Image: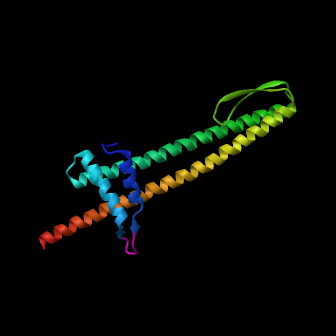
Amino acid sequence: MSLVNKYTLNRLTKALVDFKVDTNGIVVIDGVLRTSLESGFEEYLRASQERDDNVVIKNVMQDILSISEKEVSEIMNRVQSNLDAKNRKREEILALQDIIHENQFPTQFIYTDINGNELIATLDNKEKAIALLQFLESILQTLADMSQMNMMKLQTAMNKMAQTMWSLSNIMKNMHDTLKAIIQNLRG
């Protein structure tokens, strides 16, 4: 991350995602959004002590994309961890079902709680095993709910990243068009 703080980049990211586009595909910036963008770029300019506006804008865009990519990566890691936990829980349930089916009592059974801590249960009879099985199934359901929630967060983060990229692309295009118009006016 560059010299500017994360708060400023998050503010710029929010401003970029909040762009509105008119029917002709032109970016419309309202007063609040303009103020947010200007103050963010000014703070970034002071922190980096860069004098070239194009370099500042390029650096801001890279940092904003980096934040979006990091957010997506963190959520993807949570999704993977959750999937791994669900698979372990399914294996535990299958092992416990085998114990119940084969009537292997008394026995010691090792399982993990919702936080991944290993626990040992002493199963003296079928009733205790069935109660533990129901408990493990409830943990599996909780993990499935968490997985669904993480997938929605991942989708939201990916949509936000795509919107940010689209906004950044529009800014770059508008800058290019403005520079092109200035050059044509100087020639003309």
Q: Is residue 22 magenta?
A: yes
* Up-down relation of residue 20 to residue 13 (above or below): below
User: On the rendered structure, is 77 left or right of 61?
Assistant: right
Q: Which residues are magenta?
A: 21-25
Q: Position of residue 92 (x, y in %)?
A: 72, 34
State the residue at coordinates (37%, 50%).
Answer: 9
- Looking at the image, residue 75 lies above or below residue 131: below
Residue 54 in the image: x percent, y percent?
24, 55
Q: Would residue 20 appear left or right of 57 to someone viewing this image? A: right
Image-quadrant location for residue 83: top right
**Position of residue 146 in the picture relative to residue 62 (left or right):** right
The secondary structure making up most of the magenta span is loop
Where, quadrant-wise, is the C terminus in this rendering? bottom left
> Quarter of the image containing the N terminus?
top left
| Residue 146, horizontal then vertical, whole percent | 63, 46
Q: Residue at x 32, y 51 (%)?
A: 60
Q: Nearer the viewer, residue 186 or 16?
A: 16
Q: Residue at x 61, y 41 (%)?
A: 82
- Count the marks: how many? 0
